[in-house]
Each structure stands twice: as C-alpha cells, then as structure tokens.
Amino acid sequence: MKDFLKEAQKLQTKFLEQLRAIRVEGTAGGGMVRIEMDGQHNVLSVKIEPQILDEKDISMLEDLVTAAFSDAKKKITEKTQESFQSITGFPLPM
C-alpha cells in the first residue's frame, strides 16, 4: 500500500509539472484577439490587433475577448486530458 501511494504521488507530481508547461493560445475574430493561457488556467497575455480599436465597437471587442478566452480554455482542457492519459494510461475523469 505504501508503494502504491508513493507511485500515485509521483504521478501527481509529474502531471502537475506537465500542466505548468502547457501553453495554449485561444483566438477569435480571425486572430484579431488572442489570449495565451497556461495549463493551470492562468491568463498569460492578451493581444488585440489595433484595427479592432479603430472600429470603436466595444461590444464586439468584448465578445471577441470572451470567445478567445473560451477557445483557450477548451484547448487547455484537451491538453490536460492528453497529459493525464499519457501519464496514467486512463482518460481524465470529468
């Protein structure tokens, strides 16, 4: 039992290390808005192309930022599932 717990702890540590290393970019508006996130769902950067600001349409910009964030979050979920399965051989329970 002790060995099993040690092995589980090693797997957990490896999984957390892989999560920290994940980087994804969510995009919206054909790449006009980009959000970079890490595997722990931290927003690392937000990039907005200047052309959007010239349009003076704040509600559209808000929608694009929301869409880019959702895209990044979806990609993190996919990468997290891939990492978990590569370490354990089992799909991540959702």
Image (cartoon, rainbow, N blue to C red):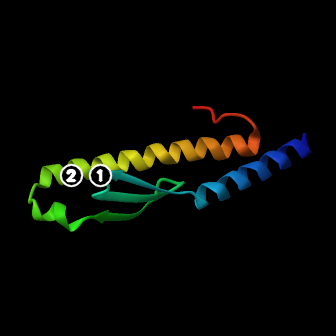
State which quadrant residue 46 falls in. bottom left
Q: In the image, 51: left or right of 86?
A: left
Quarter occupied by the N terminus: top right
Q: In x, y percent, where is residue 28?
A: 31, 50
Which residue occupies 17% across, 60% down?
52
Q: In x, y percent, where is residue 13?
A: 72, 55
User: Mark 1 belongs to which amino acid?
Assistant: Gly
Q: In the image, 20: left or right of 69?
A: right
Q: In the image, 10: left or right of 15?
A: right
- Which numbered disc flags the more N-terminal residue, 1 or 2? 1
Q: In x, y percent, where is residue 77?
A: 52, 43
16, above or below 3, in the image? below
Secondary structure of the residue carrying tag 1 is loop
Residue most extreme to the top: 94
Say few, some or many: other residues with alpha carbon within 10 Å of mark 2 (under 14 / 14 to 19 / 20 or more). few
Secondary structure of the residue carrying tag 2 is helix
Quarter occupied by the C terminus: top right
Mark 1 to mark 2 CA distance (whole Å)? 15 Å
Q: In the image, 3: left or right of 84?
A: right
Which residue occupies 68% across, 51% down?
15
Residue most extreme to the front: 30
Which residue occupies 79% across, 52% down?
10
The residue indicated by pointer 1 is 30
The residue indicated by pointer 2 is 62
Residue 72: mark: none
**Foreground tag (1 vs 2):** 1
User: Mark 2 belongs to which amino acid?
Assistant: Glu
Which residue occupies 47% across, 53% down?
41
